[in-house]
Image (tube, rainbow, N blue to C red):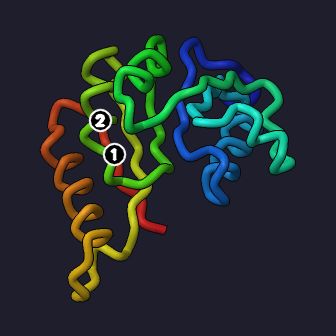
């Protein structure tokens, strides 16, 4: 129900990206409880992003224990950061009992051009498909 706060927050990674900022704004407009996982808690303000009402948590996806701590008490994780972090996201969801995982991917997964970024996208999507115990969704804008 719009306007009603959910009992547990949604954690969003990549919130200061173009897409991430819109995801957070939309969640907040719906009255969702939002927690933002960011390397730089001052960045939203510098970018002019209005995350009023969101909780900011400092952390880095390359340090999995920081994601685990930030996700504690959350019902879902929306990873707008690169999908190469999927294994870490899956492990964090399992560790804290978050059942819902939404991942932003890329149509780069369809390229025939051999490059490490494309391979990272493929590995990330494969890690999501292997997480049959989670309710996961991959979005490719």
Q: Is residue 38 above or below residue 108?
A: above
Q: Position of residue 125 (x, y in %)?
A: 24, 56
| Quadrant housing residue 6 | top right
The one nearer the camera, 131 or 83, is 83
Q: Position of residue 11 (x, y in %)?
A: 53, 29
Q: Is residue 22 above or below residue 133?
A: below
| Quadrant housing residue 94 | top left
Q: CA distance from mark 2 to mark 1?
A: 5 Å
* Residue at x 59%, y 26% (from the top left corner): 58
Left or right of residue 86, residue 58 in this image: right
Q: Position of residue 42 (x, y in %)?
A: 76, 35
| Quadrant housing residue 55 | top right
Q: How many numbered marks are there? A: 2
Callout 2 touching callout 1 (CB < 8 Å) = yes
Mark 2 crowdedness (10 Å alpha carbons): few <14, some 14-19, many ≥20 = many
Name the residue that disc number 2 marks.
Answer: 88
Name the residue that disc number 1 marks.
Answer: 85
Left or right of residue 95, residue 22 in this image: right
Mark 1 crowdedness (10 Å alpha carbons): few <14, some 14-19, many ≥20 = many
* Residue at x 76%, y 27% (from the top left corner): 3
Q: Position of residue 21 (x, y in %)?
A: 69, 49
Q: Which mark is residue 58?
A: none
Which quadrant of the figure contains the N terminus?
top right
* Residue at x 17%, y 54% (from the top left corner): 126
Secondary structure type for disc 2: helix
Left or right of residue 61, residue 122 in this image: left
* Residue at x 28%, y 72% (from the top left corner): 118
Secondary structure type for disc 1: helix
């Amino acid at each position: 129900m719009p306007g009603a706060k959910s009992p547990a927050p949604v954690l969003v990674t990549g919130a200061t990206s173009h897409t991430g900022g819109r995801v957070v704004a939309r969640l907040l407009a719906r009255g969702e409880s939002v927690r933002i996982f960011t390397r730089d808690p001052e960045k939203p303000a510098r970018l002019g992003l209005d995350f009023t009402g969101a909780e900011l948590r400092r952390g880095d996806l390359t340090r999995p224990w920081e994601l685990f701590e930030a996700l504690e008490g959350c019902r879902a994780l929306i990873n707008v950061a690169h999908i190469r972090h999927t294994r870490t996201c899956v492990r964090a969801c399992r560790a804290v009992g978050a059942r819902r995982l939404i991942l932003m991917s890329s149509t780069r997964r369809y390229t025939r051009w051999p490059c490490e970024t494309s391979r990272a996208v493929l590995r990330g999507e494969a890690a999501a498909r292997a997480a049959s115990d989670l309710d996961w969704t991959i979005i490719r804008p």
